[in-house]
Amino acid sequence: RERALVDAPMYSAHGSVYKGSFSVGLKSGNGALMWDDNASYVGEFRGDEQDGEGTFIWGTGRSYRGQWVSGRMHGQGRFDWEDGKTFEGTYVSDKKHGPGAFCWPEGSKLSGTWRNGQLDGVGVFVNSEGEARTGLWKDDKFERWVESEDKALSPEAPELQSDARLENDSAASPPGWTLTSPSCNLKGPVSVLDTSGGSNGTSTGTQLVDL
């Protein structure tokens, strides 16, 4: 793909530069689009918009690599923030929506289901020591752990990074508790502390962690 772009025509308009293929006057096929603020997109286009597989890098350094539909993050993808946090999962119209996993650079992981950009329902959290806990989230806010007998393993719930395509965010995790995507490596065997779904019958969340 990169070799094909070397000899592609270059087109500049409205503070952006495009290098790639066209169809009936519209960006179509493989191409690279760059903006004045150092943002860039390299990947597939259709009908003048990002559509297919591609990588968008913001001028700040954050990036999204995955599927696009009509200029929006839509499908399977991975979002990386400047501070090392990542999210890998399903996007619908620029928002996390469906199964996914959140990652913080220290090596912990939260798997669950997102709805309209927010974690909602059962989530399974694995800390950097490989200890797993099951909890409940509502609209991205932690409600409770579904098992609460071991008070020694009850730090504050981790905060989540919001969708950042349209907003700035600075969510941070508590010391020692961080989140990772399915590609993050955990140290040693995982000790699963909870396999129950709680009294509300939502047991599917315990199956979400890919260890």
Image (cartoon, helix red, strand yellow):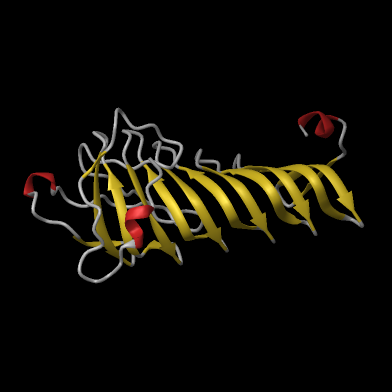
Quadrant containing the C terminus is: top left
* Residue at the spot 61% in from the left edge and 43% down from the top edge: 39
Q: Is residue 106 left or right of residue 8?
A: left
Q: Considering only vertical position in the picture, is 152 above or below 24?
A: above
* Residue at the spot 78% in from the left edge and 56% down from the top edge: 46
Q: Is residue 50 left or right of residue 154?
A: right
- Residue 172 shows in the view: no
Camera-nearest residue between 55 and 7: 55
Camera-nearest residue between 115 and 207: 207
Q: Considering only vertical position in the picture, is 200 above or below 129?
A: below
Give the image location of residue 142, x and y in percent. Answer: 24, 60
Give the image location of residue 165, x and y in percent. Answer: 51, 55
Give the image location of residue 47, x and y in percent. Answer: 80, 59
Q: Is residue 202 left or right of residue 154?
A: right
Residue, far right: 24
Q: Is residue 160 left or right of residue 165?
A: left
Give the image location of residue 45, x and y in percent. Answer: 76, 51
Residue, far bottom: 200
Picture quadrant where residue 65 is located: top right
* Residue at the spot 78% in from the left edge and 34% down from the top edge: 1
- Residue 177 shows in the view: yes
